Image (cartoon, rainbow, N blue to C red):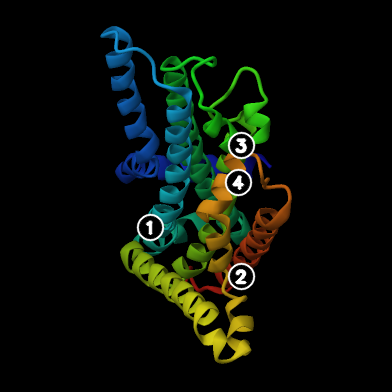
Amino acid sequence: MKRMLFLVLFELKKILNRKKALLFLIALNVIPLVASLALLIAYVKFKSFGFGEVQFSVLYEIVQGLFTGHVKLFSFIAPFFLALVVGDSFSTEFSRGYMKMLLLTPINRWQVITAKTVAIMIFLLLAVCIGGMFLQADLLIARTLTQNSGVIPDSMMKELPEQLSASKPLYLVSTGSALQLLAMTFFGNLMLIGFFIVFSLFFESAILMSFTSLSVLMGIHTFYLIASNLLSKMDPWYDTLAKWCFSRHLDDLFAVKSIEKILEGKASIFAGEIFSSLVSISLWTVAFYLLATFIFSRRQILH
């Protein structure tokens, strides 16, 4: 157990020591970071210069859009950065001989691939948590720009979620909804880590591995979109085949309507279609990890 913990920390340290790691963490959270600066400027203008307060209804729409935009952008650019992180952890170490040196020590191969996988997962969790902290800062600043008793038109009150409009004090985003979105962002991207690890075992260049795996991923998703929306009308067999495209679960999970329903309290990651997508993603994640472990155990490294 101690050896495993040491390996995980060792791999995590290598990831964070790379100069590009900081760039990744910032790029993945660019929306809440920029929003923090914008809201801070708004705070100075509205409070220091006596411009008054922003209506709660206006801030509610802004914050809802902020959370939706962050989750959508994170889900869109995360594959590119995760592919590079995985490539550096596996493909690059194959080419530089680091993997061979590591396997010359009394460490089992399954421990190596598990430690690297867990370290990459922790890196992803760190990126998600940083985004969460920025979003929390956005909420705190936004809260100072309005009052709970602010003027909210009746038309706006009807559009607000029932539990929000009935609550005192009113909140911009509930803690439960925010945590569910962050958890969804984390678990939704675990499948991609497993997918990229499988590809990284066949390459010795992180760039080439990233380009190839992302091309395959986009190809699979393109086929899913064409098969489910066009080819299925000609032959139902294509619709059945499209259901085996694992990328479709990410499409369902990170759809704008899914994000908005969680924000409004009308859906949960613990029930319904979102839960089904997360279960499917978890199964695919395990499948990719087992496949990667099998390939890694068979690969010629020491000779």
Q: Amino acid at mark 3?
A: Ser
Q: Earlier in the sequence, mark 2 or mark 4?
A: 4
Q: Earlier in the sequence, mark 3 or mark 2?
A: 3
Q: Is residue 286 visible?
A: yes
Say if 179 sits above or below 186 in the image: above
Checking the image for residue 275, the label placed there is: none
Name the residue beneath numbered marker 2.
291
Name the residue beneath numbered marker 4.
261
Name the residue beneath numbered marker 1.
80
Residue found at x 59% / y 61%: 109
Question: Disc 3 or disc 2, which is closer to the eye?
Answer: 3
Q: Earlier in the sequence, mark 2 or mark 1?
A: 1
Question: Disc 2 or disc 1, which is closer to the eye?
Answer: 1
Q: Residue furthest bottom?
A: 235
Q: How far apart in space, not on screen, are marks 4 and 3 (Cα)?
A: 9 Å
Q: Amino acid at mark 4?
A: Lys
Sort mark 2 into few (<14), some (14-19) or many (20+) by Cα contacts within 10 Å.
some
Sort mark 4 into few (<14), some (14-19) or many (20+) by Cα contacts within 10 Å.
some
Dot 4 falls on a residue whose secondary structure is: helix
**Residue 122 located left or right of residue 167:** left
Name the residue beneath numbered marker 3.
177
Q: Residue furthest front?
A: 154
Dot 3 falls on a residue whose secondary structure is: helix
Q: Depth check: 32 or 109 in front?
A: 32
Sort mark 3 into few (<14), some (14-19) or many (20+) by Cα contacts within 10 Å.
many
